[in-house]
Image (spheres, helix red, strand yellow):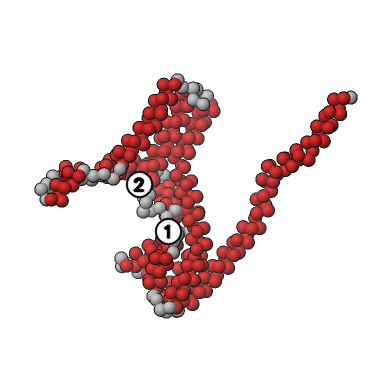
Amino acid sequence: MFDFPIQVYIGACFVGFAVPLLWWSVSAPRTNEAAGNRIKSGYSTDLRDVVLAQSGQERVVSPMIARLASMLRRRSPSGVVEALERKVALAGMTATWPIDRVLGMKLLLGIAGSSLGLLRFVAQPTAGRLIAAAVLSVAGFWGIDYLLSVRGRRRQDALSQELPDVLDQMTISVEAGLGLEPALMQIVDHAEGPIAEEFSYVVRDIRLGMGRERAFRAMTDRTDVPELRSFVAAMVQADKLGAPLANVMRLQAGEMRLIRRQRAEEEAQKLPLKMIFPLILCILPALVMVLLGPAIIDAIDGFSKI
């Protein structure tokens, strides 16, 4: 526990309430209606009105995070920012959490963890609290990386699980007479999950003028699923050679379904090994106490009467 006077606790409570309130008041997407009306009506072209017409998030929060991200980007070792961008892409958060926002939040959380740890250390300077301060700093700075890695692994697993069923739907659509892009749109409109999101990016890139091969290659760059990479390679090869796409999709779906079943069997074979440690550490001691407890008590009573 903190060894602070009661006034410090009260002040911390007020600060705890004030920080979210300040963040909400600054970052809430509210604009200056008077300035906006003047701009829309054409009565004002003043630069100040243009700035005031923006929300507080656009005027204050976004530039602040961009500055923090730029500072952290300049001071980061080579390859660290690229690896973080890869994690964001694998997690499917490129649109909602761009790299500048992630870098800014890493720095803010690192400062917050360091401040909390130093407060505890100043209250009672001990080696344990100094280590705790260092742990809080590292956790605050690298916590986002861990969360992105976990989300990325889950997303890649979901892509691998959904891909065979999605290919079956695409095969039916192509055999019914649809082209590849309309078949992809059928998946985007009627399916949910990361595979539909990735296919929506492919359709968007093709409509913006990108070649079909480049659009599919970009999808493999955003993901880390071997089955999806194999599917893209087969589709690109079939498109170049003029092979029937439906046959290629059917073969790919069958192979991916076989791989998915083999992966499930492999995970099932690992279960006995994974259950050994919980069995030894949790169940076995309780079982020993239940079985041998009465005998131990009787033995102690017998020795005490001698």
Q: Position of residue 32 (x, y in %)?
A: 21, 43
- Residue 221 placed where, x, y %? 42, 60
Q: Is residue 258 positioned above or below 38 on the image?
A: below
Q: Amino acid at mark 2?
A: Asp
Quadrant where the C terminus sits is top right
Q: Residue at x 34, y 64 (%)?
A: 204
Q: Is residue 224 left or right of residue 20?
A: right
Q: Residue at x 45, y 71 (%)?
A: 170
Say which of 76 and 178 sits in front: 178
Measured as percent of width and height from the top left, residue 82 is found at 41, 51
Mark 1 secondary-structure assignment: helix
Of 37 and 236, the residue lying toward us: 37
Amino acid under label 1? Arg
Location of residue 196 by image quarter: bottom left
Do residues under tags 2 and 1 come within 8 Å of each other at their CB atoms? no
Is residue 86 in view from this perspective? no
Q: Which residue bears the numbered disc 2?
A: 100
Q: Most extreme residue toward the right, as rendered? A: 306
Q: Which residue is mark 1?
A: 222
Q: Earlier in the sequence, mark 2 or mark 1?
A: 2
Residue at 49 percent of width and 22 percent of height = 3
Quadrant assignment, res 56: top left
- Given residues 303 and 66, the one toward you in this image is 303
Q: CA distance from mark 2 to mark 1?
A: 18 Å
The quadrant in which residue 211 appears is bottom left
User: What element does badge 2 sit on?
Assistant: helix
Relative image position of residue 239 (x, y in whole percent): 41, 75
Q: Is residue 276 above or below residue 255?
A: above
Residue drawn at x 65%, y 50% as measured from the top left: 274
| Mark seen at residue 59 | none
